Image (tube, rainbow, N blue to C red):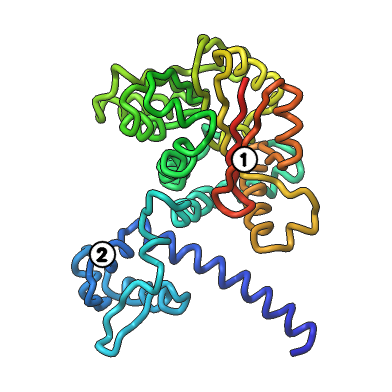
């Protein structure tokens, strides 16, 4: 294969990946993967369409596309099955980063990409409040497994937090969104009480509804805050920033304020996508996901932070005993630091 043929094949691969994302998104949103997974002996495209009351022709085309992308396998009887490991990767697994949810986030944000043409000329970005409910629902879905992962793999093993697991504790979720993270923590730790804050009134309203639905009003409170100064109280044992730091412009000032809100020896837990240290890293498979995430965030005026920048930020804001935990290779990382 000549060099130009290799370049053509690479560009064709990018187009293929674009279509694969849409096929995964459709399968996730319409519960196609779940129904196929429930049918251990396999299911035909016609029966799949019938069970979900969907158009038979389109479901047939979707099944063939999912087979093409090796998401589904086909047996000699003409029935479709999930391909190996796809039950773990495509069905919501509490201990894995939920890839379909992440893809749904990008698909949900795709309408905002049209704004780029104008943004390149004017520099004007969108507000998170301008994003539609598909986007916010997808973000919620993508991050839903993260608290379970932290509960199962981090909190009970961290040298400074494992003693907090069985104690009465006061927790602040800074940038709580719809509150589902706090709800998962509250169900896992009966002695923990929570305050969740966010600048988005719509998300706080959804959080309030989710908390009432789960009958946790006595243990979880939520408030709207402004993007400027805020007063969340004092003496928190743990403060959570889950995929929030990249949305904060005045990071140093906010982390200093959060330090004041912690009790002595209290801990700050940050979960973030990490920017690369060197531009060459962008040509790796993980680097391409990172640049995709940064592009999606750029339209909202947000900037990812690198590992070295994170360490420096925690240092200059006087946090200590910094611990690091990887979630999704080099892409997602947890930092925990003491006041």
Please name whichever residue, 24 or 216, is drawn nearer the observer in this view of the structure. Answer: 216
Q: Is residue 259 left or right of residue 214?
A: right
Provide residue 168's location: percent of width, then percent of height: 38, 18
Any part of residue 133 in sight: no
Mark 1, residues whose alpha carbon is within 10 Å: few (<14), some, or many (≥20)? some
Q: Which residue is mark 1?
A: 324
Picture residue at 62% right of the left edge, 74% below the top: 13
Tag count in the figure?
2
Picture residue at 56% right of the left edge, 68% below the top: 17
- State which mark lies toward you, 1 or 2: 1
Q: Is residue 6 left or right of residue 34?
A: right
Picture residue at 45% right of the left edge, 23% below the top: 201
Q: Residue 35 shows which numbered tag?
A: 2
Please name whichever residue, 159 or 67, is drawn nearer the observer in this view of the structure. Answer: 159
Q: Secondary structure at mark 2?
A: helix
Work out whether 55 lies above or below 163: below
């Amino acid at each position: 294969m000549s060099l130009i043929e290799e370049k053509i094949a690479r560009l064709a691969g990018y187009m293929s990946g674009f279509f694969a994302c849409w096929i995964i998104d459709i399968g996730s949103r319409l519960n196609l993967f779940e129904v196929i997974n429930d049918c251990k002996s396999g299911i035909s495209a016609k029966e799949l369409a019938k069970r979900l009351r969907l158009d038979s022709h389109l479901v047939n085309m979707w099944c063939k596309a999912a087979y093409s992308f090796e998401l589904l396998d086909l047996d000699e009887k003409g029935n479709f099955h999930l391909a190996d490991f796809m039950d773990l990767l495509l069905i919501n697994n509490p201990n894995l980063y939920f890839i379909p949810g992440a893809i749904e986030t990008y698909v949900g944000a795709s309408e905002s990409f049209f704004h780029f043409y104008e943004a390149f000329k004017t520099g004007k970005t969108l507000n998170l409040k301008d994003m539609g409910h598909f986007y916010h629902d997808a973000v919620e879905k993508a991050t839903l497994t993260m608290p379970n992962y932290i509960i199962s793999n981090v909190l009970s093993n961290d040298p400074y937090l494992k003693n907090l697991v069985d104690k009465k504790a006061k927790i602040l979720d800074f940038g709580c969104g719809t509150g589902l993270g706090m709800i998962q923590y509250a169900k896992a730790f009966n002695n923990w009480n929570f305050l969740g804050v966010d600048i988005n009134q719509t998300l706080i309203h959804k959080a309030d509804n989710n908390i009432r639905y789960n009958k946790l009003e006595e243990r979880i409170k939520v408030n709207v805050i402004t993007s400027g100064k805020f007063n969340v109280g004092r003496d928190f044992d743990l403060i959570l920033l889950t995929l929030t730091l990249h949305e904060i412009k005045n990071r140093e000032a906010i982390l200093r304020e959060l330090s004041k809100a912690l009790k002595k020896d209290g801990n700050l837990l940050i979960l973030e996508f990490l920017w690369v240290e060197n531009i060459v890293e962008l040509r790796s498979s993980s680097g391409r996901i990172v640049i995709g995430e940064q592009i999606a965030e750029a339209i909202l005026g947000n900037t990812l932070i690198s590992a070295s920048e994170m360490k420096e930020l925690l240092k200059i804001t006087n946090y200590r005993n910094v611990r690091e935990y990887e979630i999704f290779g080099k892409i997602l990382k947890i930092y925990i630091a003491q006041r």
